[in-house]
Amino acid sequence: MKEQPVRRAPTMPLIGPSLVSAVDSSGRVICRKLCVPVETVQRGVEGLMYLMTESSKHMISKVDFLDSVLVLGFGEELNQILLQLYLQHHSEIRSILSQLPSNLPAYHNLEWRLDVQLASRAIRQQVVPVLTMRLLLTGGGDGTGELSRRVLQTDPGTLLHLISTLEGALAAIKTNHARRIFRNIK
């Protein structure tokens, strides 16, 4: 009895429901030959799609990508294949992701004004600074592209505390320890 050559699936886009539905249709034959449940193959494809989209979204370097894949427990050869796949397709994935609508509002402009109250009826000599900011945002998932406005007021002390807290959070997220934790959470 002569063995039939294994047919390869036609090349498809790396992201999208067409790839997942390909697992449903032509993947059933492969699953039967490998004696693997269809759900396992579908979860594997979805996992690879997630790995590639998140890696492309965050524009991670080669070293960071290999560190991320190392946690999965694959062999060195498979890690290198995944790295090559990522390097070949990350720009295409980013262009597809940029075309998808975002449901989060995006920064458009920030206008600010510093108001200082120098005196009041009760207290003649006082200085009370207040920073008023108008934040203009675009989008928000509705697709209209309209601007939404948010007015914020704060005193300089609270603003300085907020700035130092955010800078500390950015510094903490860039540490190697935090990157390893985020990779394991994903």
Image: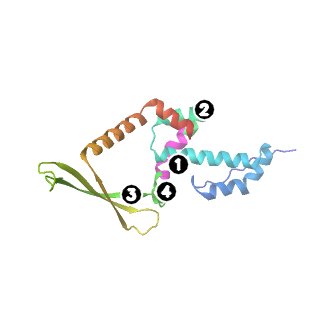
* Helix, strand or loop at mark 1: helix
Disc 3 to disc 2: CB gap under 8 Å = no
Sequence-first tag of 3 and 4: 4
Disc 1 to disc 2: CB gap under 8 Å = no
Mark 2, residue position: 77
Q: Per the image, is 89 magenta?
A: yes
Q: Which quadrant holds the C terminus?
A: top right
Residue toward you, 10 or 86? 86
Mark 4, residue position: 96
Q: Per the image, is 164 magenta?
A: no
Mark 1, residue position: 53
Which residue type carries mark 3? Ala
Q: Residue furthest front?
A: 122
How far apart in space, not on screen, are marks 1 and 2 (Cα)? Answer: 21 Å
- Dot label at residue 156: none
Mark 3, residue position: 106
Q: Residue furthest right?
A: 1
What range of the chain is rendered magenta? Answer: 83-93
Sequence-first tag of 3 and 1: 1
How far apart in space, not on screen, are marks 3 and 1 (Cα)? Answer: 20 Å
How far apart in space, not on screen, are marks 3 and 2 (Cα)? Answer: 40 Å
Residue toward you, 64 or 120? 120
Which residue type carries mark 4? Ile
Which residue type carries mark 2? Glu
Q: Tell me if 120 is positioned left or right of 105 in this view.
A: left
Seen at 37% across and 68% down, the residue is 146
Sequence-first tag of 4 and 2: 2
Sequence-first tag of 1 and 2: 1
**Disc 1 packing (10 Å; few <14; some 14–19; many ≥20):** many
Disc 3 to disc 1: CB gap under 8 Å = no
Seen at 53% across and 37% down, the residue is 183
Which residue type carries mark 1? Thr
